[in-house]
Amino acid sequence: MSEKMDRRKQYTRMVLKESLLDLLKEKSIASITIKEICTKADINRSTFYAHYSSQYDLLDSIDDEFTEDMVKTLNQYNFSKEDEAYQMTEKIFEYIASKSDICRILLSENTEVQFQKKGMMIAKEYILKNFIPHKQVDAETFEYLSIFFVSGSIYMIKNWLESGMNKTPKEMAGLLNEFLNRGLRGQAR
């Protein structure tokens, strides 16, 4: 019986997430109502509130799930080694390509940039933990470096998704690593 309930709960959460993501393709999170989500998911409002407190809570759940998967991908690599940094970057682009629909939505203006901010914080932690111990960089320089690295990466990914992913994940990883490595070394061609 418990397993059946778990499957029903999982199904309900899945259709709620899919419904919200579908609505986010058309309009901003602020203009989406619980009623619209429930109608699209074909569930009643009390069922919605048994799982989530608001459309923002539901979006946070989607965001957290995606972020958790991304962190698992990041944890597989040692960012301080340049060849593994490239492999990690390629894996991230492959992951993003495999989840391009949800990434497009989470990176859109309709989500009020909360996903981008969370992504920036996670990436900054990885840089601090894995890159900085191997390089002598003061706190102020690190702050600017991480903003440059993370913002540029996020907007590069966003542009890649919006332009129809016209390059392979491998090509994008190569471009991003080239930009970052030249920027980090202060070299210009």
Image: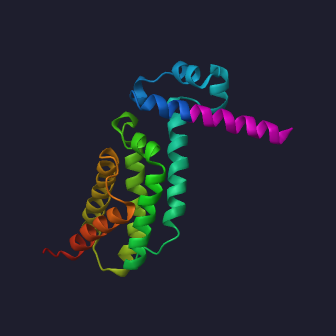
User: What is the x, y in percent for residue 82?
Assistant: 37, 78
Q: Would residue 35 be found to the left or right of residue 155 on screen?
A: right
Against 8, residue 126 (above or below) is below
Residue drawn at 30 percent across, 64 percent down: 176
Residue drawn at 48 percent across, 52 percent down: 98
Is residue 9 shown in magenta? yes
Residue sitting farthest toward the left? 189
In-front residue for pair 14/133: 14
Q: Would residue 43 be found to the left or right of residue 114 on screen?
A: right
Quadrant of the image occupied by residue 129: bottom left
Against 18, residue 186 (above or below) is below
In-front residue for pair 1/64: 1
Residue drawn at 53 percent across, 47 percent down: 64
What secondary structure is the stretch in magenta mostly built from? helix
The part of the chain drawn in magenta is 1-17
Residue sitting farthest toward the right? 1
